[in-house]
Structures are given as C-alpha cells and as structure tokens.
Image (spheres, rainbow, N blue to C red):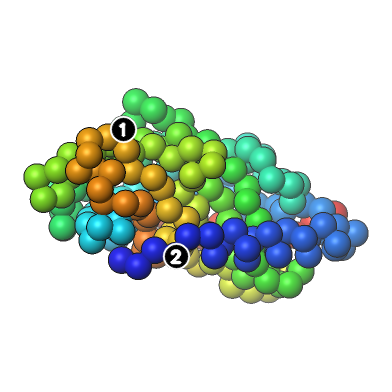
C-alpha cells in the first residue's frame, strides 16, 4: 500500500474554510437516525513496510444527537466492533474491545454547500493488535493520529444526501509502536470501502444526512 500523509488534511481544511464562509445558509447537519452499523467486507490495514492485512469487520456506532453543528468536536461513540479474524488474509488483526467506547470526532466535509459529497469523522482511542510474518504489534489511534473515515454521500429527493458507502482514508497514517520490528514497518493506515446502515435487523435502511438552519 502506498501511503500519502497529509493530503486529506489540506482537503478538509479547505472545505472547513468554505463552511465557515457559508454558515448563513446551513449551520447544522441532520441525521435520519442516531445509531448506525458499518459493514466492511474487507477492511485492510497496511504499513509502509509492505504489510497488508484484510479482514471482514462490523462496527456499531451512534451520534449523540439527530442534529450536529458544523464544528469540529465529539459527535458520538463506537460501542461495539467485531473482526472476523479467521477470514483475514495477509496476517490478522483484532480490535481491543476493552477500550470501547471509542470517540468519533467530526472533521469536515467535501463538496459545495448544499451539495456535499463526503462527511469526514475520525476515530480516536481505537486500539488493536495485529500480526504478520511472525511479528506481533499493538497500535492505538490518538487525537493527533486518528483513523479517518468518510461517509460517501449521494443526492436523494427532498434535499437530503444518502450515505451510500464508507471510505477509509489511507492518507491519514498512524505511527507504529512496540518492538523494534514493529517500528521498522514505518507507519500504517486502514483502507477500503464499506457500507453503512441504520442499526437494525436486518440492516437495509440507509442513513440520510440533510443540511438545516
């Protein structure tokens, strides 16, 4: 995996600056539901040293409220996570569920108001163990080195935007700590595209996001 540090920061910074200039048109996001389910058939963790581990992942999360101001800050939590470790390829990783809940922070958006195309959030305090080539390591995301995910939005009738997919932003990398062999792998990041639904059984309803005053 080729990792490109910092690209998303510039994109989000530009979008955030535009957002500040247009708050008169819409100050908040409105969500159709507060609980959502992330389904990743293959979420890949890769390192600059060439490690690439892909696993099916399920994550359950929630927003604090059905409305959210366009201001960077805590907007919700991840309450549950599951990695289908036996189905991993290239190695394996496991989320440390004892560190739950993880924080989700609003980071910014892409697109031109009101037709935004992506809504970015970052995960902090996500702790996971990973193993490849006989080397075992432990990694944690922090406020300064988070894992970033973007809701990919498409237009629907009534002015809303439907979250059709989730995209892990691989340009946001994490320092790898632990043994010398772990640090030798350089930096790491998640990559892949998943689906997002309202957290119901069966998961068939999509999350809709609207801009409101």
Residue drawn where x is 30% and y is 56% of the image: 47
Residue drawn where x is 69% and y is 45% of the image: 72
Q: Position of residue 77 (x, y in %)?
A: 52, 36
Residue drawn where x is 32% and y is 51% of the image: 186
In the rendered image, the residue lying farthest to the left is 134
Q: Position of residue 94 (x, y in %)?
A: 25, 40
Q: Position of residue 192 (x, y in %)?
A: 37, 63
The quarter of the picture where the N terminus appears is bottom left
Label 2 element class:
loop
**Nearer the observer, 137 or 80:** 137
The quarter of the picture where the C terminus appears is bottom right
In the rendered image, the residue lying farthest to the top is 98
Q: Residues within 10 Å of mark 2 (few under 14, many from 20)?
A: some
Is residue 58 found left or right of 116 in the rendered image? left
Specify whether residue 179 is in view. yes
Label 1 element class:
loop
Q: Residues within 10 Å of mark 1 (few under 14, many from 20)?
A: some
Q: How many marks?
A: 2
Query: Can you identify the residue that label 2 sits on?
Result: 4
Query: Can you identify the residue that label 1 sits on?
Result: 96
Spatial CA span between label 2 and label 1: 27 Å
- Dividing the picture into quadrants, the one containing residue 48 is bottom left
**Nearer the observer, 131 or 101:** 131
Residue drawn where x is 16% and y is 58% of the image: 89
Specify whether residue 200 is in view. no
The mark that comes first in sequence, 2 or 1, is 2
In the rendered image, the residue lying farthest to the right is 24
Q: Nearer the viewer, mark 2 or mark 1?
A: 2
**Nearer the observer, 36 or 172:** 172
**Nearer the observer, 138 or 157:** 138
């Amino acid at each position: 995996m080729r990792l490109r540090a910092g690209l998303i920061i510039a994109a989000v910074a530009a979008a955030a600056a535009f957002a500040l200039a247009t708050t008169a048109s819409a100050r908040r996001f409105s969500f159709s539901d507060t609980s959502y389910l992330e389904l990743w058939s293959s979420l890949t963790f890769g390192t600059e040293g060439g490690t690439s581990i892909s696993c099916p992942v399920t994550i359950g999360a929630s927003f604090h409220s059905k409305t959210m101001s366009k201001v960077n800050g805590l907007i919700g939590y991840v309450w549950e996570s599951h990695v289908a470790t036996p189905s991993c390829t290239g190695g394996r990783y496991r989320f440390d569920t004892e560190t739950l809940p993880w924080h989700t922070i609003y980071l910014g958006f892409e697109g031109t108001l009101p037709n935004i195309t992506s809504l970015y959030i970052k995960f902090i305090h996500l702790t996971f163990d990973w193993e490849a080539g006989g080397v075992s390591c432990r990694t944690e995301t922090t406020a300064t080195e988070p894992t970033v995910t973007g809701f990919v939005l498409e237009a629907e009738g009534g002015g809303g935007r439907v979250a059709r997919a989730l995209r892990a932003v691989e340009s946001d990398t994490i320092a790898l700590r632990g043994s010398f062999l772990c640090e030798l792998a350089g930096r790491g990041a998640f990559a892949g595209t998943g689906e997002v639904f309202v957290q119901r059984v069966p998961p068939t309803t999509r999350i809709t996001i609207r801009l409101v005053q």
